[in-house]
Image (cartoon, rainbow, N blue to C red):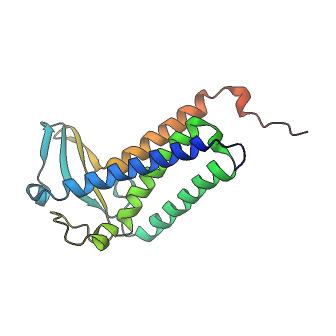
Amino acid sequence: MPGVPRSRYFLFTLIAAAGCAADLVTKGWVFSWPELAGGAVHWLWPNYVGVQLSCNPGALFGMGQGMTWLFAALSVAAALAILSWLFWFGAARDLWLTASLGSVMAGILGNLYDRLGLAERLWPGMGQSITPSGNRVRDWILFQWSDAWRWPNFNIADSMLVVGAAVLFCHAIWQPHDERQPRDCG
Protein backbone atom coordinates (compact mmCIF):
# COMPACT_ATOMS: atom_id res chain seq x y z
CA MET A 1 0.00 0.00 0.00
CA PRO A 2 1.47 3.36 -0.96
CA GLY A 3 1.99 5.61 2.02
CA VAL A 4 2.37 2.81 4.58
CA PRO A 5 5.96 2.73 5.84
CA ARG A 6 7.67 -0.65 5.58
CA SER A 7 8.50 -0.42 9.26
CA ARG A 8 4.78 -0.77 10.05
CA TYR A 9 4.62 -4.13 8.27
CA PHE A 10 7.59 -5.20 10.35
CA LEU A 11 6.13 -3.86 13.62
CA PHE A 12 2.75 -5.51 13.05
CA THR A 13 4.31 -8.85 12.11
CA LEU A 14 6.75 -8.73 15.02
CA ILE A 15 4.03 -8.07 17.62
CA ALA A 16 1.60 -10.59 16.13
CA ALA A 17 4.23 -13.33 15.75
CA ALA A 18 5.93 -12.77 19.11
CA GLY A 19 2.62 -12.61 20.98
CA CYS A 20 1.27 -15.73 19.27
CA ALA A 21 4.54 -17.59 19.87
CA ALA A 22 4.56 -16.59 23.55
CA ASP A 23 1.00 -17.88 23.86
CA LEU A 24 1.65 -21.21 22.15
CA VAL A 25 4.96 -21.85 23.91
CA THR A 26 3.53 -21.14 27.37
CA LYS A 27 0.47 -23.29 26.68
CA GLY A 28 2.64 -26.17 25.51
CA TRP A 29 4.93 -25.77 28.50
CA VAL A 30 2.36 -25.59 31.30
CA PHE A 31 0.12 -28.25 29.76
CA SER A 32 3.08 -30.65 29.93
CA TRP A 33 3.29 -30.42 33.74
CA PRO A 34 1.91 -33.73 35.05
CA GLU A 35 1.52 -32.27 38.55
CA LEU A 36 -1.20 -29.94 37.23
CA ALA A 37 -3.49 -32.73 36.06
CA GLY A 38 -6.90 -32.93 37.64
CA GLY A 39 -7.31 -29.20 38.33
CA ALA A 40 -4.38 -28.85 40.73
CA VAL A 41 -3.07 -25.31 41.28
CA HIS A 42 0.58 -24.27 41.34
CA TRP A 43 0.58 -21.00 43.27
CA LEU A 44 3.02 -18.28 42.21
CA TRP A 45 1.61 -15.88 44.83
CA PRO A 46 -0.30 -18.09 47.26
CA ASN A 47 -4.07 -17.69 47.09
CA TYR A 48 -3.86 -14.86 44.51
CA VAL A 49 -1.95 -15.79 41.33
CA GLY A 50 -1.33 -19.28 40.08
CA VAL A 51 -1.23 -21.78 37.24
CA GLN A 52 -4.23 -24.04 36.77
CA LEU A 53 -5.05 -25.86 33.56
CA SER A 54 -8.47 -25.64 31.96
CA CYS A 55 -9.90 -25.99 28.49
CA ASN A 56 -12.61 -23.58 27.33
CA PRO A 57 -15.03 -24.99 24.73
CA GLY A 58 -16.62 -21.55 24.22
CA ALA A 59 -15.51 -17.95 24.04
CA LEU A 60 -15.41 -15.15 26.61
CA PHE A 61 -16.06 -16.62 30.09
CA GLY A 62 -17.09 -19.92 28.49
CA MET A 63 -20.11 -18.47 26.67
CA GLY A 64 -21.21 -20.13 23.45
CA GLN A 65 -19.99 -23.62 24.26
CA GLY A 66 -20.20 -25.97 21.32
CA MET A 67 -20.01 -23.16 18.74
CA THR A 68 -16.31 -23.60 17.97
CA TRP A 69 -16.87 -23.38 14.22
CA LEU A 70 -18.57 -19.98 14.63
CA PHE A 71 -15.77 -18.57 16.80
CA ALA A 72 -13.16 -19.92 14.38
CA ALA A 73 -14.98 -18.30 11.43
CA LEU A 74 -15.28 -15.00 13.32
CA SER A 75 -11.57 -15.16 14.16
CA VAL A 76 -10.64 -15.61 10.51
CA ALA A 77 -12.98 -12.78 9.48
CA ALA A 78 -11.50 -10.48 12.15
CA ALA A 79 -7.94 -11.30 11.08
CA LEU A 80 -8.77 -10.54 7.44
CA ALA A 81 -10.52 -7.30 8.42
CA ILE A 82 -7.51 -6.18 10.47
CA LEU A 83 -5.11 -6.88 7.60
CA SER A 84 -7.38 -5.06 5.14
CA TRP A 85 -7.86 -2.03 7.36
CA LEU A 86 -4.18 -1.69 8.16
CA PHE A 87 -2.55 -2.43 4.85
CA TRP A 88 -5.19 -2.08 2.13
CA PHE A 89 -6.90 1.03 3.51
CA GLY A 90 -3.70 2.44 5.01
CA ALA A 91 -4.53 2.60 8.73
CA ALA A 92 -1.01 1.29 9.35
CA ARG A 93 0.23 4.85 8.84
CA ASP A 94 -0.77 5.27 12.49
CA LEU A 95 1.81 3.69 14.80
CA TRP A 96 -0.63 3.09 17.68
CA LEU A 97 -3.20 1.41 15.43
CA THR A 98 -0.50 -0.82 13.98
CA ALA A 99 0.83 -1.85 17.40
CA SER A 100 -2.58 -2.39 19.00
CA LEU A 101 -3.91 -4.41 16.06
CA GLY A 102 -0.70 -6.47 16.07
CA SER A 103 -1.52 -7.35 19.67
CA VAL A 104 -5.13 -8.20 18.75
CA MET A 105 -3.88 -10.36 15.88
CA ALA A 106 -1.56 -12.26 18.25
CA GLY A 107 -4.55 -13.07 20.44
CA ILE A 108 -6.70 -14.10 17.51
CA LEU A 109 -4.03 -16.44 16.15
CA GLY A 110 -3.17 -18.01 19.51
CA ASN A 111 -6.76 -18.90 20.32
CA LEU A 112 -7.61 -19.86 16.73
CA TYR A 113 -4.76 -22.37 16.84
CA ASP A 114 -6.52 -24.11 19.73
CA ARG A 115 -10.02 -23.78 18.28
CA LEU A 116 -8.88 -25.54 15.13
CA GLY A 117 -7.46 -28.36 17.27
CA LEU A 118 -3.95 -27.86 15.93
CA ALA A 119 -2.32 -28.58 19.31
CA GLU A 120 -3.67 -32.12 19.14
CA ARG A 121 -3.28 -32.64 15.41
CA LEU A 122 0.27 -31.37 14.99
CA TRP A 123 1.78 -32.75 18.21
CA PRO A 124 -0.47 -35.54 19.51
CA GLY A 125 0.37 -36.79 22.98
CA MET A 126 2.96 -34.07 23.50
CA GLY A 127 3.04 -34.98 27.18
CA GLN A 128 -0.03 -32.91 27.89
CA SER A 129 -1.47 -33.51 31.32
CA ILE A 130 -4.81 -32.22 30.03
CA THR A 131 -5.59 -32.98 26.41
CA PRO A 132 -7.88 -30.32 24.96
CA SER A 133 -10.45 -32.59 23.36
CA GLY A 134 -12.95 -31.08 20.98
CA ASN A 135 -11.00 -28.02 19.85
CA ARG A 136 -10.98 -26.10 23.12
CA VAL A 137 -8.90 -23.07 24.00
CA ARG A 138 -6.21 -23.94 26.55
CA ASP A 139 -6.23 -21.57 29.53
CA TRP A 140 -3.83 -21.60 32.44
CA ILE A 141 -3.43 -18.24 34.22
CA LEU A 142 -5.38 -18.06 37.48
CA PHE A 143 -6.25 -14.88 39.41
CA GLN A 144 -8.37 -14.79 42.50
CA TRP A 145 -8.99 -12.27 45.25
CA SER A 146 -10.29 -14.75 47.77
CA ASP A 147 -11.88 -18.17 47.78
CA ALA A 148 -15.15 -16.35 47.04
CA TRP A 149 -13.91 -14.43 43.96
CA ARG A 150 -11.99 -16.08 41.15
CA TRP A 151 -11.50 -14.70 37.64
CA PRO A 152 -12.00 -17.32 34.90
CA ASN A 153 -8.69 -18.83 33.78
CA PHE A 154 -7.13 -17.21 30.72
CA ASN A 155 -3.96 -17.31 28.61
CA ILE A 156 -1.43 -15.04 26.90
CA ALA A 157 -3.60 -14.76 23.76
CA ASP A 158 -6.49 -13.44 25.86
CA SER A 159 -4.10 -10.94 27.45
CA MET A 160 -2.89 -9.78 24.03
CA LEU A 161 -6.50 -9.25 22.92
CA VAL A 162 -7.31 -7.19 26.02
CA VAL A 163 -4.17 -5.07 25.79
CA GLY A 164 -4.74 -4.43 22.07
CA ALA A 165 -8.38 -3.49 22.65
CA ALA A 166 -7.44 -1.19 25.55
CA VAL A 167 -4.85 0.62 23.42
CA LEU A 168 -7.43 0.97 20.61
CA PHE A 169 -9.93 2.43 23.08
CA CYS A 170 -7.39 4.88 24.51
CA HIS A 171 -6.29 5.83 21.00
CA ALA A 172 -9.90 6.59 20.02
CA ILE A 173 -10.47 8.69 23.15
CA TRP A 174 -7.23 10.68 23.11
CA GLN A 175 -6.55 11.05 19.41
CA PRO A 176 -6.56 14.78 18.60
CA HIS A 177 -9.99 15.86 17.38
CA ASP A 178 -8.74 17.35 14.11
CA GLU A 179 -7.24 13.97 13.11
CA ARG A 180 -10.66 12.30 13.42
CA GLN A 181 -12.28 14.58 10.86
CA PRO A 182 -12.55 13.27 7.30
CA ARG A 183 -10.06 14.91 4.99
CA ASP A 184 -11.43 17.03 2.18
CA CYS A 185 -10.13 15.60 -1.07
CA GLY A 186 -11.31 18.51 -3.18
Question: Total number of numbered labels?
Answer: 0
For this rendering, which residue is in front, 92 or 56? 92
Judge whether 77 appears above or below 15 on screen: below
Taking the spot 12% from the left edge, 46% from the top edge, the residue there is: 42
Q: Can residue 64 be seen in this view?
A: no
Judge whether 40 appears above or below 4 on screen: below
Q: Can you give x and y, in whole percent of width and height, for residue 74 in the image?
A: 51, 62
Taking the spot 43% from the left edge, 46% from the top edge, the residue there is: 161
The quarter holding residue 173 reads top right
Taking the spot 18% from the left edge, 43% from the top edge, the residue there is: 50
For this orientation, the residue located farthest to the right is 186
Judge whether 74 appears above or below 90 on screen: below
Q: Can you give x and y, in whole percent of width and height, for residue 86 in the image?
A: 62, 48
Judge whether 160 appears above or below 117 on screen: above
Q: Can you give x and y, in whole percent of width and height, for residue 58 in the image?
A: 36, 62
For this rendering, which residue is in front, 178 or 21? 21
Q: Can you give x and y, in whole percent of width and height, for residue 140 in the image?
A: 24, 51
Taking the spot 38% from the left edge, 56% from the top edge, the residue there is: 110
* Left or right for 27, reference 44: right
The quarter holding residue 65 reads bottom left
For this orientation, the residue located farthest to the front is 6
Q: Is residue 123 visible?
A: yes
Q: Quadrant of the C terminus?
A: top right
